[in-house]
Amino acid sequence: MIRKSGIGLAAIALGLMAGTMSAKADFWSDAGAKYQGVVLHGVTESTPPSNYVKDVLAPEFEKRTGIKVEIETTSWDQMYDKAIKDMEAKTGIYDMVYIEQDIIYAYLARNFLVDISKSLKDDPSLKSPDFDEANFTTFANYFKNAEGNLFGIPMEAFIKVYLYRTDLFGDAKIQEAFKAATGKDLKPATTHEEYTQIAEFFTQYGKDNGLELWGTTAQAHTGHPASWYEFFESIAPTFGVYNWGIDANNNYAASVANGGQMNSDKSKTALKYWLHLRDIAPPESAASTWTEVGTTFAAGRVAQGLVYGENAAWIASDAEKSKVVGNVGVALPPTDPAVLEEVKSGTGYLGYYDGGAFGLPITSKNKEAALLFLQFIGQDSVQADWAVAAPRITNTATYDDPKVIDMDKKLNGYYSMLKNEGKLFAGAPPFPFHAQVREATAPIFYRILLGEIGPDEGLDQMAEAAEAELTNLGYRK
């Protein structure tokens, strides 16, 4: 009896210990206990990755910690406007702000953000055992300062890829018609000449057959920065014009006269190439941003196009939103062969490696609770479902998850391309004057799109305006 009683007591003791250990092992509930009643507020662009944070990760975090998270998803321009005004005025409305890769340098220069690495080191009680900066892909490096400290938790990363309709490219009758018209076999383009030829063929094919079908997309809005970005980040690099044509090592020269490339012959050739594609693209192209380009492709209105990878998953797999499910091929953007060699040698890049992170404003009134949420969305365990819902990968381990491997097959190798060829792409140049130069030159660019000024003259004026702004800002001496 005594022995049995002893065993019983031991078992009870072990059970209690296990229960206590289990409770203590639940970092999220323990850490969140101190912040009951706190409501975190974040602002981000309304994109598939951000909507997943709002609809899935935020509610799950509240369930685990008791900390409520309200994510405001809005337009790209409103997102920036709200975040920057809040941080400038130090009103502390937002506890998390979306930081696109291209704006991080300006935010760091203005000391807008909390040093996440330092904060977690200074207060180990806030550090989750499931969070490790080493788990991120190299894309996280874009959100670090010179000392290597992290100022943003990557939440999306993707490249802008060449999508094409496999059903159209694989149609025997269309292949025969293309061969008759061009003397070539129909296959995804690798050069600008091939891409143009395919675009012209399908636009004419649509006309001849009474179809709502055009040969290419064009992110060519006449009054939105999306068109400016398409040219400088997606088109110009494939012609060998990098970093917007601004040479940071040569007194920030933009004009050819001073050693820059913004108005170089390569830039002018690139712009004329793109304007021609715009002219044979669907009529909505003149009002298309990155969002509308995705919906145009999903509607089956184009045979090919450059589309941000964040849209690739739903275009290829969501039958409720896309008419081309199962018929989406993925390839590298077409480029000049000599440029591709430059890119592979590491002296250039093929296109834009886009993405963003959630940063913690120094003006936040709930920094500790916000640090918990940022770690929550940065841990490996939440990444796979997120990547399947929206094709973004920020953690290295995500590539090997069975769900992601299966989705990769449905996307015809998009994730494999991101993993293996992502090194050919690059983020925006590390310019703290990013927004200022864009705003100084964009109005001229819109005039080119509207036909009010020719492309050659327009690029000349843009280079001049860029240098004037850089001089005004104190970068050009």
Image (tube, rainbow, N blue to C red):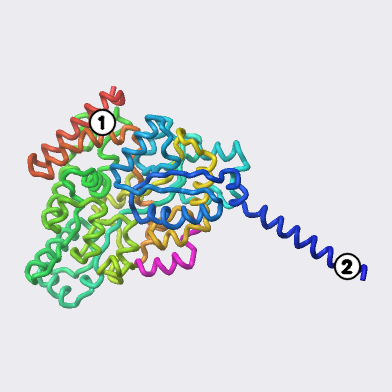
State yes or no: residue 408 in magenta. Answer: yes
Under circle 1, the secondary element is loop
Residue at 44%, 67% (x, y): give it: 405
Q: Quadrant of residue 216?
A: bottom left
Q: Position of residue 12 (x, y in %)?
A: 79, 63
Q: How many marks?
A: 2
Q: Amino acid at mark 1?
A: Ala
Please give left or right for residue 328 compared with residue 119 in the image: left
Which residue is identified by label 2? 5
Q: Which residues are magenta?
A: 396-411
The kind of secondary structure the magenta stretch mainly shows is helix
Q: Residue furthest right?
A: 2
Residue closest to the eye, 306 or 72: 72
Q: Amino acid at mark 2?
A: Ser
Query: Can the viewer see residue 239?
Result: no
Q: Position of residue 382 (x, y in %)?
A: 50, 57
Question: Dot 2, crowdedness within 10 Å: few (<14), some or many (≥20)?
Answer: few
Residue closest to the eye, 301 or 229: 301
Which residue is identified by label 1? 253
User: In front: mark 2 or mark 1?
Assistant: 2
State yes or no: residue 388 in magenta. Answer: no
For the residues labelled 2 and 1, the Cα–Cα distance comes to 85 Å
Query: Can the viewer see residue 103?
Result: yes
Question: Dot 1, crowdedness within 10 Å: few (<14), some or many (≥20)?
Answer: many
